[in-house]
Amino acid sequence: MRKLVLFMHVSLDGYASDSNGGLDWIPYNEELEKYAEEVVAEVGSPVYGRTTYRMMESYWPTVLDNPNASKHSMEHAKWLQDVEKIAISGSMDIVEWNNTKLIKDNIAEEIKVLKEQSGKNLVIFGSPGAAKTLLELGLIDEFQLTICPVILGGGKSAFHGDAEKIRLKLLSSRTLKSGIIAARYELEK
């Protein structure tokens, strides 16, 4: 059985993007890139909400045709082209990116079926809106958060709202040179 894992960069005050949807506050560097590669190595299917899916779909296929793309970007683009991707959206009717499954209705049932399959984990990349929905449905099993040393004071979060208290158990943590805390949690049982 696979887990549904949330991998998200968050500010110290819990936001996944600033008030304009921007991500330029994430201190992305080689060390964070290597950590993200460790996370991706555990992914059977990436899961995206509508906004993140559209952003990924518009960018990564273009890398395959870019002769100036870095080795890392090219490898990631090839992986994304071939891996089964999951898009969760009530407003999209079709997905056109290679090997993508759209979940529009019956989200809980569809995700439970995917979790029952063998293989590597389902991993939600960012996508705070979809993550919030999946969290409220009680479907997220593990949280891999990179907590960035910045306070945004507002923005979009998967955690703010009317959700009930959810207790987590720390599985591991490490501090990157940039000040990011890479923390991994599971639901407390």
Image (tube, helix red, strand yellow):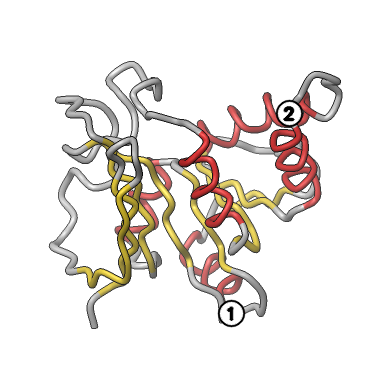
Locate residue 160 relative to residue 97 in the image: left or right. left
**Helix, strand or loop under label 1:** helix
Is residue 169 left or right of 65 when viewed as pictured?
Answer: left
Viewer-nearest of labels 2 and 1?
Answer: 2
Residue 182's spot in the image, x, y percent? 34, 52
The picture places residue 120, in percent across and down from the top left corner, at 62, 70
Q: Amino acid at mark 2?
A: Ser
Residue 67's quadrant in the figure? top right
- Nearest the viewer among 69 and 55 is 69
Residue 33, image x, y percentages: 53, 40
Which of the two labelled residues, at mark 2 and mark 1, occupies the earlier sequence position? 2
Compared with 16, 106 (above or below) is: below
Give me the residue at 30% from left, 23% from top.
18
Query: Could you tell me which residue is drawn at 70 percent across and 33 percent down?
Result: 73
Residue nearest the viewer, comparing 109 with 24: 24
For the residue marked with disc 1, what is the amino acid? Glu
Q: Which residue is mark 2?
A: 70
Query: Dot 1: few (<14), some (14–19), or many (≥20) neighbours within 10 Å?
Result: few
Query: Which residue is at the front of the view, 181 or 52?
Result: 181
Residue under label 1, please give it. Answer: 116
Q: Is residue 71 above or below residue 122?
A: above
Q: Taking 35 as reference, is 81 left or right?
A: right
